[in-house]
Amino acid sequence: MELVLHRTYFKEGTNGALFINQQFLGFTIELPWKENLKRVSCIPEGVYELKPRYSDKFKHHLVLQNVPKRSLILIHPANDANKELQGCIAPVSSLIGIAKGLQSRIVFQKILSSCYQAFDRKEKVTLTIKN
């Protein structure tokens, strides 16, 4: 299964549109591009494998594999990238500004459900990030 994230970059943050198997699923918010610096930048464009992950803080969520010079880049709920993210990607139902959105958990649950079904079928799940 392939997820595709089409990004738009701004000085204050990054907004995106997320698709699963070419169907629009929702929007995303991220930190601005700052040369891939840890905790303050979104990650580079590219193709990343997604894996399931669990933590006490985020419960079930997704982690991107093999991000250059970065680790623990997650897909998890958040509505304000600059206050709630440290390089991760947050899905949102609607955008209300640059790197800000609403109802993150609704879209996040749809993504999680689709990905976990694919994992159960032993499918490889990838996220392609492009401009």
Image: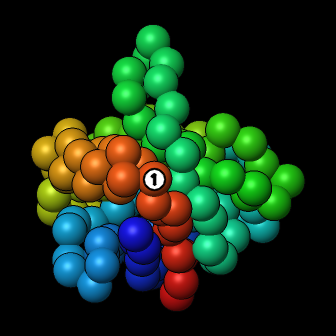
The answer, for residue 115, to whether it is visible in the render is no
Circle 1 is placed at which residue position? 122
Residue shown at the point (54%, 54%) measured from the top left: 50
Residue at far top of view:
56
Q: Is residue 71 visible?
A: yes
Locate the N terminus by quadrant.
bottom left
Q: How many marks?
A: 1
In the shown orientation, is residue 60 left or right of residue 9?
A: left
Q: Residues within 10 Å of mark 1 (few under 14, many from 20)?
A: few
Question: Horizontal placement of 71 versus 6: left or right?
Answer: right
In the image, residue 28 lies at what x, y percent? 34, 62
- For mark 1, give the secondary structure: loop
Res 32 → quadrant: bottom right
Residue 93 x/y as whole percent:
16, 57
- Please tell me whether residue 102 is drawn above or below residue 13 in the rendered image: above
Front residue of 81 and 74: 74
In the image, residue 47 sits, relative to residue 95, either above or below, namely below
Residue type at numbered disc 1: Lys
Question: Coloured how?
Answer: rainbow
Front in this rendered view, residue 110 or 76:
110
Q: Nearer the viewer, residue 74 or 87?
A: 74
Q: Would you say 116 lies left or right of 67 here?
A: left
Image coordinates of residue 51 in percent, x first then y, are 54, 46
Residue 127: where, in percent of width, then height?
50, 68
Q: Residue at 61% x, 45% y: name it.
A: 73
